[in-house]
Image: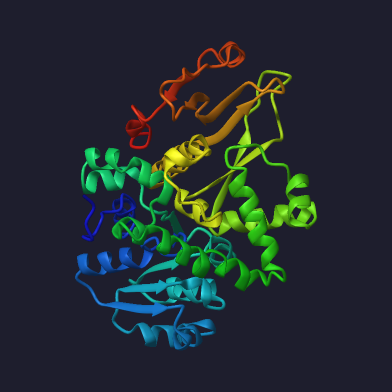
C-alpha cells in the first residue's frame, strides 16, 4: 500500500539534468502538488549553501520586489543556489531574477509558482532565453505504481477515479473527501481571484460546476454563458484563467480530410478527477454513479497528459467527431504520425471504431483502452 514515505517524482531526474548550466529553472504547478518538496529534495542532494526566499513571506516580498543587483549580491552572499518558492507573489520577480543571472556569478536560481499566468507574465519577457520551464502536476499512475506496485494501483483504480492523485489525498486514505473539499475551498480559486480581481466569484464557481457536469462532452460557450449568467467573452476569459491555474484544460477537435469533421469544437477536462468531484460534491462509489464512463475518460486523458509532460514528450492532442456523431475519444499527433484511442470502462461492451475514421486515416495507430490494459497507456509514450 501507499505509505507516507517520499514518492519519487519522475520530473526530478529531468530537473537534475538542468542543474549544471546557468539558466533559471521555473517549476510551475497547482498548489499542494509538491513543488516545495522538490526544492527540499534538491537541497539535501546538493552539498552547497542555499539562499531561500518564499513569496508567501511579506518580508521576503519586500526584499526582492525592487532590489538592485548590488543588494541582491549582498543578500545572496556566498550561496551557490537560490530557491524562490511561490515566486508569483513577488512584484517584479522576473527583473530581480534577471539581475541575479546577469550580475551574480556562479549562482543557479530555481523559482516555483502555483499560477502559470501570473508567474509567466512576470518572468517570460525578462528571462527570454535564460530559463528552463517544467510543470509539476498531481501524482501520475506511473509514479505510484513504481512507489508501491502495479498490483496495488490496480486494486486502487476505482478510488483513484473518484479521489484523484493530489499528494495529501493519496497519502491520507480514509480522509480523501474532506481533504479535497478543503483543497477546493482554500486553494482552487485563490490565485485566479487574487490576481484577476474577479468581481463575481460565484459566476466562476458556477462555470466550473457546469464544466464538471459536462465532462467528456463538447462545450458551447454560448450555452455556458446562459447557464452562468455571463457573456461569451467572459466565459472564454474564465476558462483561460482556469487553464492557467492548472484546474482544467481544453481538447480541440481534429480535422484533416473529411468535410463533415467538426473543426471548431472543444471539450474541457480536469487535471484531477478528485478536484472535479469536489467541485460538484460527488464522491459516491462508481457502482452508484451515472458518470463512470466520463470519469474513466478524464482519468485516462489527464493521466496521459501528466505522463507525457513528466517525460518531456511533446504531442498534439485532439478529439475527433463528425456531424454524424462518429467519434474518437483521443487523437495524438507527432511528426505527422497519428494515434487514435477509444476509452471503454465497461469491458463487456464492444468498442466500435468508426470506419469513416479508419478510411480517412488508414495509417493511424488505433488502441481501445480498458481497465484491462490501461497501465501501459499511462506509463509509456
Q: In the rendered view, would you say 86 is above or below 302?
A: below
In x, y percent, where is residue 290?
A: 53, 38
Query: Outermost residue, front direction?
Result: 288
Q: Quadrant of residue 176?
A: bottom left
Q: In the rendered view, would you say 221 is above or below 176?
A: above
Q: Quadrant of residue 3?
A: bottom left
Examine the rendering and report whether any part of residue 24 can be seen: no
Colour mode?
rainbow
Examine the rendering and report whether any part of residue 106 can be seen: yes
Left or right placement of residue 271 versus residue 45 in this view: right
In x, y percent, where is residue 102?
A: 45, 72
Q: In the rendered view, would you say 368 is above or below 174?
A: above
In x, y percent, where is residue 181?
A: 47, 63
Q: In the rendered view, would you say 181 is above or below 291?
A: below
Left or right placement of residue 350 versus residue 174 in this view: right
User: Which residue is rendered at x = 50% and y = 56% of the image?
Assistant: 278
User: Which residue is rendered at x = 39% and y = 79% of the image?
Assistant: 53
For this rendering, which residue is in front, 100 or 259?
259
User: Which residue is rendered at x = 46% and y = 17% of the image?
Assistant: 350
Q: Quadrant of the C terminus?
A: top left
User: Which residue is rendered at x = 73% and y = 19% of the image?
Assistant: 259
In x, y percent, where is residue 311?
A: 36, 43
For this rendering, which residue is in front, 292 or 353?
292
Number of numbered discs overlaid on the protein picture:
0
For this rendering, which residue is in front, 150 or 348?
348
Amino acid at each position: 500500500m501507499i505509505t507516507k514515505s517520499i514518492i519519487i517524482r519522475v520530473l526530478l531526474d529531468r530537473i537534475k539534468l538542468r542543474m549544471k548550466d546557468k539558466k533559471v529553472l521555473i517549476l510551475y504547478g497547482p498548489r499542494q502538488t509538491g513543488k516545495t518538496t522538490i526544492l527540499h529534495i534538491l537541497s539535501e542532494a546538493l552539498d552547497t549553501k542555499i539562499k531561500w526566499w518564499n513569496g508567501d513571506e511579506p518580508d521576503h516580498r519586500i526584499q526582492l520586489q525592487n532590489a538592485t543587483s548590488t543588494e541582491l549580491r549582498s543578500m545572496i552572499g556566498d550561496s551557490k543556489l537560490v530557491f524562490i518558492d511561490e515566486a508569483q507573489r513577488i512584484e517584479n520577480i522576473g527583473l530581480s531574477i534577471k539581475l541575479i543571472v546577469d550580475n551574480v556569478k556562479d549562482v543557479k536560481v530555481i523559482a516555483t509558482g502555483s499560477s502559470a499566468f501570473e508567474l509567466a507574465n512576470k518572468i517570460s519577457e525578462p528571462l527570454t532565453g535564460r530559463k528552463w520551464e517544467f510543470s509539476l502536476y498531481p501524482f501520475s499512475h506511473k509514479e505510484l505504481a513504481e512507489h508501491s506496485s502495479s498490483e496495488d494501483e490496480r486494486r486502487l483504480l476505482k478510488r483513484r477515479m473518484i479521489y484523484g492523485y493530489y499528494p495529501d489525498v493519496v497519502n491520507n486514505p480514509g480522509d480523501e473527501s474532506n481533504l479535497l473539499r478543503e483543497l477546493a475551498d482554500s486553494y482552487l480559486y485563490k490565485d485566479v481571484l487574487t490576481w484577476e480581481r474577479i468581481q463575481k466569484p460565484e459566476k466562476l464557481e458556477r462555470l466550473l460546476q457546469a464544466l464538471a457536469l459536462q465532462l467528456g462532452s463538447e462545450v458551447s460557450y454560448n450555452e455556458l454563458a446562459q447557464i452562468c449568467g455571463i457573456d461569451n467573452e467572459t466565459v472564454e476569459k474564465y476558462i483561460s484563467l482556469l487553464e492557467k491555474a492548472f484546474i482544467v484544460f481544453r481538447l480541440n477537435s481534429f480535422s484533416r480530410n473529411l468535410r463533415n469533421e467538426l473543426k471548431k469544437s472543444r471539450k474541457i477536462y480536469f487535471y484531477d478527477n478528485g478536484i472535479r468531484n469536489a467541485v460538484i460534491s460527488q464522491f459516491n462509489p462508481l457502482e452508484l454513479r451515472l458518470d463512470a464512463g466520463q470519469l474513466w475518460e478524464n482519468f485516462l486523458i489527464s493521466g496521459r497528459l501528466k505522463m507525457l509532460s513528466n517525460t518531456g514528450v511533446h504531442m498534439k492532442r485532439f478529439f475527433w467527431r463528425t456531424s454524424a456523431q462518429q467519434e474518437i475519444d483521443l487523437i495524438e499527433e507527432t511528426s505527422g504520425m497519428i494515434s487514435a484511442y477509444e476509452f471503454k470502462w465497461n469491458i463487456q461492451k464492444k468498442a466500435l471504431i468508426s470506419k469513416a475514421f479508419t478510411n480517412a486515416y488508414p495509417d493511424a495507430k488505433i488502441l481501445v483502452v480498458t481497465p484491462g490494459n490501461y497501465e501501459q497507456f499511462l506509463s509509456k509514450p
